[in-house]
Image: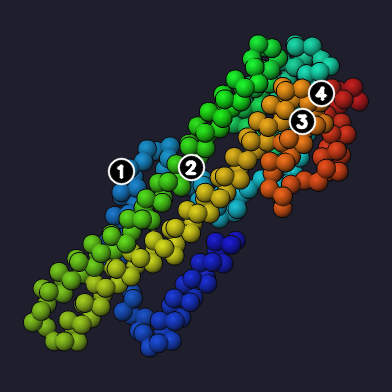
Amino acid sequence: MNIIIGLIVTFGCVIGGYMAMGGHMEVLMQPFELVIIGGAGIGGYIVANNMKTLKDTGKALGEAFRYKVPKERHYLDTLGALYSLMRDLRTKSRNEIEAHIDNPGESPIFQAAPTVLENKELTAFICDYVRLIIIGNARSHEIEALMDEEIQTITRDRMKPYHALNVVGEALPAIGIVAAVLGVIKAMGAINESPEILGGKIAAALVGTLLGVFLSYSIVSPITANIKAVREKQNRLYIIVKQTLLAYMNGSVPQVALEYGRKTISSYERPSIDAVEQEMMAPRGSDIKAA
């Protein structure tokens, strides 16, 4: 919603200001300049990226427009699932724990945390490191290094649409100049025409420069910044899992380990201690089966 409001304000102020100072809208109506700039930008984007990145770009744009970031429910589900797993690690046998991580879709623990279960990458991340914990041979600093490496890989993959769109945004002013030069070439071909006709052709050529700069700094760059913010917030869930499990491996009881994870959440989004305690008291896992 913020993106839509921002675009309305941007177009309204630019076009409104232009008209207020006496500009004529018909001069700005240069669809072929837009075809040149847009076609070159999209074509270059396709050349520079593989199909997976192209598809993920569409997904990232949808997430940015909907501002699909983790909400309090996502944080509480993540912390609640981790608490249940850590509690069972202290009280249950290895086979019982493996039943949860080998088939999380049928695990009562993960079923009680639907926002975690629907995030397949996050679920796999949790299960992989719980499996390493129950093996018993891994040291916490080794697990931390492995987690850091995997989180960096996940972040790098999820930021590919941002970096790819950012390159296009930086190139658009230069592509606008290409469109303007083509317009000037066309105008020079009509050098013998009257000043009114020649002036119109030169004005049309300059619209290419305008479009390139405008699309770059007022449209593409703000949207890519939003994509980056959304993806970074989504990746915060992995940091929560990392800090919580490492705290548990270093000897913290599950209740205290959760605080290590909770504190990695931004203060204005962080669930309260009371909300987390209520989540821990909710029936999960073996408690659900017992009920």
Residue corresponding to mark 4: 87
Residue at the farthest right position? 291
Mark 4 crowdedness (10 Å alpha carbons): few <14, some 14-19, many ≥20:
some
Q: Amino acid at mark 1?
A: Val
Q: Amino acid at mark 2?
A: Met
Identify the residue at image location x=21%, y=77%: 202
Residue corresponding to mark 3: 257
Task: Name the quadrant containing residue 30.
Answer: bottom left
Mark 1 / mark 2, whichever is N-terminal = 1
Query: Is residue 107 something one can see in this rendering?
Result: no
Between the C-alphas of marks 3 and 2, the distance is 29 Å
Label 4 secondary element:
helix
Residue corresponding to mark 2: 159
Do the numbered discs 1 and 2 sit on residues whose CB atoms are within 8 Å?
Answer: no
Between the C-alphas of marks 4 and 3, the distance is 11 Å
- 23 vs 100, left or right, is left
Mark 2 crowdedness (10 Å alpha carbons): few <14, some 14-19, many ≥20:
some
Label 3 secondary element:
helix
Residue corresponding to mark 1: 47
Residue at the farthest left position? 192
Mark 4 / mark 2, whichever is N-terminal = 4
Between the C-alphas of marks 1 and 3, the distance is 47 Å
- 72 vs 91, left or right, is left
Identify the residue at image location x=35%, y=65%: 213
Q: Quadrant of the N terminus?
A: bottom right
Q: Amino acid at mark 4?
A: Arg
